[in-house]
Image: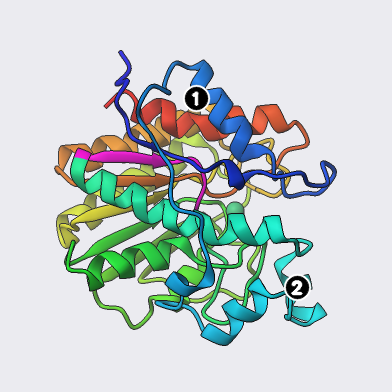
Amino acid sequence: MNNPNLPLVYHPNYSFNFDPKHRFVMSKFARLFQEVKTMGLVNNNVHNPETGSPSPLELVHCEQYIWDLWRNQLDIKMMRRIGLPWSEALMARTFTAPLGTLKTAELALEHGIACHLAGGTHHAHFDFGSGFCMVNDLAFAATHLINTKKITNALIFDLDVHQGDGTAAMLKHNPYVFTCSIHCEKNFPFRKHASDLDIGLEIGLSDTHYLEVVASTLESLLLDLNPDIVFYDAGVDIWQGDSLGKLDISWLGIAKRDALVLGLCQKHGIPVATVIGGGYDKDHQRLAKRHAIVVQQAAKF
Ligand SMILES: [Zn+2]
């Protein structure tokens, strides 16, 4: 049984014409949208964020940095750290996606659950970008909701295989947002920034142990914090076949993880906004299917 009214957030500018051989699969957002459509999950439930610009992101980012980025005035070293070639289309999608995560969170507060078909750019820091991430949608959306008094506290539960260093650093002094990252310890970023809770997993960890860690961690966080919302970064680079992950999680293991996270949030009556996070694959269609898992699980609620 699927909930045909599960709110989805998407913008056509998320994917654009891009080098198909690049490690970052830019087509994955459009492919994911197609995938959830094929699953019958697209009706009148798709919400588009406005097209973005740097102004709203001034809330959490260094103004100089985001405007220099927008105008292609960052130096080569800073662009190299981001790892994506600058283009106007890249800027359009980069500054639109955080508005999408915010919209997803607002929809989650209203409906209990909502899914963004993008988001999770957790390596973006206050004044620099890194690892394909330029602006931090999670830090932005959580801070925005708190500042506008729509919520009093939030949990960012980041299960991308890579540690959420940017989110951790940007929210370090925000007592109303709790950041938790469960990731592979010996993986990018090699210099980590402390989250409120970090769990670094061993290389090659498989389903059973992984799911135990996720379940017990989330259960105790929900009890301790009783957050007004959970931002769930459902990165699929935990998969055993991912080209940048180093864990040994099966396809079914990802589905179990997502069902478990969403189920615990529901059990505690806490709204949850999902973002897709990372995933890397030479097979672009397979990657889109992998990112669709969280949406498929969410549709069961
Ligand atoms: Zn990742």
Question: At label 2, which amino acid type do we have?
Answer: Met
Q: At which x and y percent is residue 1?
A: 30, 13
Left/right of residue 6 with respect to residue 208 in the rendered view:
left
Question: At label 1, which amino acid type do we have?
Answer: Val
Residue 158 drawn in magenta: no
The residue lying toward the viewer, choosing from 281 and 56, is 56
Q: Residue furthest top?
A: 1
Would residue 121 be visible to someone looking at this image?
Answer: no
The residue under label 1 is: 36
Residue 239's place in the image compared with 53, above or below, is above
In magenta, the rendered stretch is 111-120
The residue under label 2 is: 79
Disc nearer the start of the sequence (1/2): 1
Q: At which x and y percent is residue 138?
A: 42, 61
The residue lying toward the viewer, choosing from 67 and 142, is 67
Disc marking residue 56: none
Q: At which x and y percent is residue 129?
A: 63, 72
